[in-house]
Amino acid sequence: MPDDLRSASFADLDTTTLYGILKLRSDVFVVEQDCVYPDLDGRDTEPGTRHVWFERDGEIRAYLRVLQDGETQRIGRVVTAPKARGTGLAARLVEEALTIIGNRPSALEAQAYLANFYAKFGFQQTGPEYIEDGIPHIPMRRP
């Protein structure tokens, strides 16, 4: 069975989907990566935020959000469920995010080991590597 691509504003998310998204983010970012941080940062509910995900049989398998930061669109919270990794869902999500973004500039804060992955989509490193929650990150931008 194929994965279904979905996209919605916060107001259009049903509670079951929202729970699945937040559970996936918590399972990977907080538990798997051992990072205690405020995932619920208030940005999910902003009017310009788009939530993009793949689901299969009601299970959220991959997710990202697109935030509006002035003139720049910010891609964040890119996550794939462990059993869905290696299936190309993250790349398909980034492609969908870039379709949503269109010709506007975009940025993201990549975990450093994923720099080459994002470079395939035209993102370039814009600053030095830094550590966030014990994980090396790099700022990246796409004009």
Image (cartoon, rainbow, N blue to C red):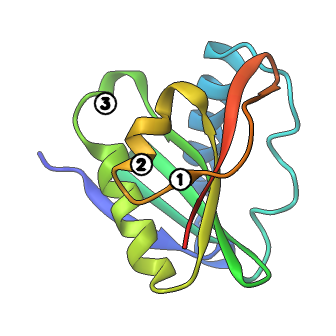
Question: In terms of image quadrants, where is residue 61?
Answer: top left
Q: Residue at x 79, y 16 (%)?
A: 134
Question: In terms of image quadrants, where is residue 69?
Answer: bottom right
Pick the front one: 29 or 14: 29
* Residues tagged 2 and 1 counted as in contact (Cβ below 8 A): yes
Mark 1 lies on a secondary structure that is strand
What residue would you read off at disc 3? 84
Q: Is residue 39 above or below residue 29?
A: below
Q: Is residue 20 above or below residue 76?
A: above
Q: Quadrant of the N terminus?
A: top left
Q: Residue at x 49, y 37 (%)?
A: 115
First in sequence, mark 3 or 1: give its number: 3
Pick the front one: 31 or 86: 86
- Checking the image for residue 124, the label placed there is 1
* Mark 1 neighbour class, 10 Å CA radius: few under 14, some 14 to 19, many 20 or more: some
* Residues tagged 3 and 1 counted as in contact (Cβ below 8 A): no
Question: In terms of image quadrants, where is residue 137?
Answer: top right
Question: Would you say 67 lies left or right of 142 here?
Answer: right
Identified by mark 3, the residue type is Ala
Question: Would you say 90 lies left or right of 41 here?
Answer: left
Identified by mark 1, the residue type is Gln
Q: Where's residue 97, x and y in %? A: 45, 67
Question: Would you say 1 lies left or right of 25 here?
Answer: left
Question: Would you say 40 lies left or right of 10 here?
Answer: right
* Mark 2 neighbour class, 10 Å CA radius: few under 14, some 14 to 19, many 20 or more: some
Q: Is residue 129 above or below residue 21?
A: above
Q: Residue at x 78, y 20 (%)?
A: 35
First in sequence, mark 2 or 3: give its number: 3
What residue would you read off at disc 2? 119
Q: CA distance from mark 2 to mark 1?
A: 6 Å
Q: Residue at x 86, y 30 (%)?
A: 37
